[in-house]
Structure formats: C-alpha cells, structure tokens
Amino acid sequence: MSYLAVDDDICALATVPGVSALAVIRCAGPHCIDKLADITNKPQKLKSCIGYQALFAEVRDGAETIDECVFVAFRAPKSPTGQNGIDIMCHGGTVTVRRILSLLERHGFRTALPGEFMFRAVHNGKIDVLKAEAVDELIRAQTDIAQEAAVKKLKGGLRSEFEVLHAHLIAGAAACAVQLDYGEEEAGETIEVMYRELDTSYRLCTELIGSYAKGRLMQEGAVVVLAGKTNAGKSSLFNRILKEERSIVSEVHGTTRDYVEAALDIGGIPVRLIDTAGLRSTEDAIEAEGVRRTELLAESADVVLYVVDGTQGCTPDDEERMRRYKRCIRVWNKTDSEHALPVPEVPLRTEEVLQVSGATQGVTLLGDSEHFDAWVATAAKTGAGEHELMQKLFAVLTAESNTGASLACSVSTKRQYLVLQRIEQNLKVLCEKLRYAKQHHFDMYYVDIQEILAVYAELVGETNPEMILDSVFSQFCVGK
C-alpha cells in the first residue's frame, strides 16, 4: 500500500492501546463521514454535521450496539488533513477498540500506514515537512527540554535558520544572474559578491550539520553503564542517583548477576542508567553470564562510570578495562570509609608522557585523554560527590555536541542531516571554483547554484521525492 493512495478512506487507533477511560479512533478520507453514518444510530445527524461539531451516538454492528461514542466531524478543506475526517471517542479497552476497527474495515476503511494522516496534511498543504518532523519530535520527547525545543521547532524555529541559509543562496544566484546579462563587465566584483554570499551559506550549513549531535542526543538519549569489580559500590551508587532502592545491595560478592536499568533526565538528556554485575572471574555459570553481559554493555555504552572501591584501590586490571571503553569516567567510591585510600593524582596523558620523554617527533598521539581525566570522589552511602559526578557526566555526554546553535535550532533528523551534507559539499566545490579558477564561467556557476537550490527545496519539503515518504512518515506512529 502506498502513501500516495490519498483517496482511500483510512482509520487507526490514535491513542495508546490497552485499558483506559477513553480511546480515540481517527478516520479520514473523501467518503469517511458517509461510511461512518452507516454504522451509527443517527446517520442523518452525522451526515449533516458541520466541521468541528460533536455528536453523541451509538456505534452499531447491525442491530447490536458496540459502544456509545462521541463523533467529532472535520470538513475539508478546514480539517487537520485537508480531507473530511472523524475522530471517534469511544471507551477504552482492547475488545471495544478491536471490534470498532474491524467494523470500519468491513465498511470500506483500511488501516492507515504509519504517519499517513500527517502525510495527507503535508500533501494537502496544511503543514510542511519540517513541521511534520517537529510533531514527531514532540511525540517522542522524553524530557522537558526536548519537549520545549520541539514546540519551538513546531512554531518555526528551525525553519527560520534554514531561511537565513536560503537568503544567502538566493543573493549569490541573483549576483550570478545579473552578471550573465552584462558579459565580462565587472566580473571581478561579481565573483567577490558571489563568494561572500555562498561562503556564508557554506558556514551556516556547516554549523547546522554540527548541531546534529546535540539534537540527536536530546531526542535519542544516551546509555550510561555502571561497571567495576564486585562490591565496589555500583548498586549503592545506582540507588543513590535514582533516589530509590532499585538494586539489591549486599556485602556478598556477586549479588548483582544481571543488569538493572532505569530512565533518568540529566540536564535535558534522556539517559538509560544501567547497573551491572561485578567484574571478576567466577566458576558460577549464572554470575559468569552476568559478567559477560556487563562487558558487552560497557563496550557499547555511550559512557561508562567505572567504580573503584576506594578502600581497595585501583589495580592494573581496572586500568586496562578503563582504557578499553570509548568514554569512561573514573569513580573513586567509599571515600567516607575510615579505611579509604587517598584519591589518586590525575595520571599523565599520553601526550604529556611523550613530551617529558622527548619522544614526540614522528609519534601519533592517541586520543585517550577522555580516559585519563581526574577521579570523581564519591560516597554512595552519604551522597558525597554525587553532584560533581552528574556534572562530569553531563559534560562528557555533551562534549561532542557543544555547538553554538540552540536546541530549538538544532538539526535532529537524519534526513535533514544528510540533505544538509549534500548542500555543504556542493557549496564547498563551488566556493573553491570561485576562489581559485583562472577563468570564470557564470553560466556554469548559475547551473551549480540552481542544483543547490533544488537540494534546499528537498530539505524544506518544497519537493517531495519518494524517498521523503520513507524517511519521514514511516517513522511516525500509526494514527498520526
């Protein structure tokens, strides 16, 4: 089935399935109101409903009443999709919803594809693709900050950034078009104007691409794993961060045998915090499986909080493990114990070691400074150091997304990111031609700029190639 079958009458559950006070079944299509009238006890009243009018009526399967519902009518073109539509508010529950949807299918409706209602809204000019993507972000937002940013995008925050980029592209195209009318006269001045405008576009494009890491982080979140040897205090620290007893804490080694996870909001970043089995050699098959899972989780995590028992100290084994993880924060726990050892000094970074030895020439410096940051001293039982640990975690999570763009102006969909990369690459090539070419061919430059503008039109949804259907609307939930 294709999104382009816009004359079909479609239906879908728009609320979360399961037991609830109410459920909403969304319907849209040219003939949906007439078809729905056939399954109510008030067919004429439903057919005569004006837009945004509600009607209380029964849903009937022949002589049998399935439910008492409220029908809200929408009339084209002043409707969310631009087509006729009905929202059926019925009682929640899986059986009632299933029976109504089955009845609708028997009366000529088909189940909507993911995002098909939103696609029809875009297709009929009710909203644009950027607003559709902002709606999807709003639905999927996991933190207050992500939700607020999505609303700002819904109100045009990101589009305004794209429009600045577009304005400079148009200025460059206009200068080139004027030059085509004047031949070689004042060609040098035109090249300067074109280069200035298109280089500005290139820089804006690069900044928008750089904002993708921030936008994606706020939308998709991060996985943070607590790892370390048995009895290092990982579970106590996990419970302390969550402010609740989620993991069992015991003096017995190997108490945690499988991972436990919880959702956190750290500065607007949705985080999956995972407490794992302690790392040690063991003959116990179940515990050994827990250790294996810990290793896999830690190696794939965005950040590892590697917890060391401050009364026992850091071993070469610990050091080797910490070097293995892509981003690791060292946690020196149990600092409140009378047996606690002093927190170690910051280890020398790779480049510092090489500089001291005078061996930097011809040596590639390894980028392992993230593994050798200062220890964060904590006491899970008292909460000491927790604030500093959360600050450090936020800094590490956002290190790759520290751009000047506000979150409301951050690129957060892969489609936008990939299209902007195409624009950036084309602009880079064109700017190099303008700067270094010995002979200038304005007719060719004009064609180049028009090609870039065509890609820009794809970015903002002014053209809708088939790929947009898959990359945008297939990611939506059914019923939206």
Image (spheres, rainbow, N blue to C red):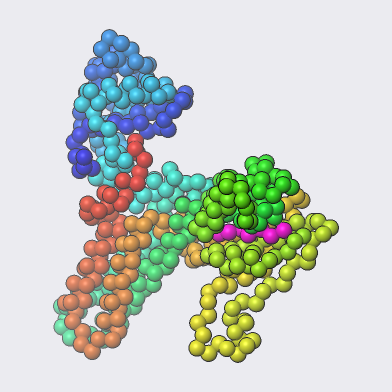
Residue at 36 percent across and 61 percent down: it is 417
Residue at 26 percent across and 81 percent down: it is 433
In this view, which residue lies farthest toward the top? 63
Query: Predominant secondary structure in magenta?
Result: strand
Residue 89 x %, y %:
38, 24
How many circles with numbers are drawn on the protein? 0
Instruction: Indicate yes or no whether the magenta region holds residue 50.
Output: no
Q: Which of these two is toward me, 351 or 412? A: 351
The answer to whether residue 196 is visible is yes
Q: Which of these two is toward me, 139 or 443? A: 139
Residue 463 x %, y %:
23, 55
Q: Which of these two is toward me, 63 or 145? A: 63
Residue at 64 percent across and 64 percent down: it is 318
The answer to whether 388 is drawn above or below residue 41 in the figure is below
Quarter of the image for the C terminus: give it.
Answer: top left
Residue 96 x %, y %:
37, 20
The answer to whether 263 is drawn above or below residue 36 in the figure is below
Residue 466 x %, y %:
22, 52
The answer to whether residue 127 is visible is no
Q: Residue 108 occupies which quadrant of the picture? A: top left
Residue at 66 percent across and 56 percent down: it is 229
The part of the chain drawn in magenta is: 302-309
In this view, which residue lies farthest toward the front? 283
Quarter of the image for the N terminus: give it.
Answer: top left
Q: Which of these two is toward me, 431 or 195? A: 431
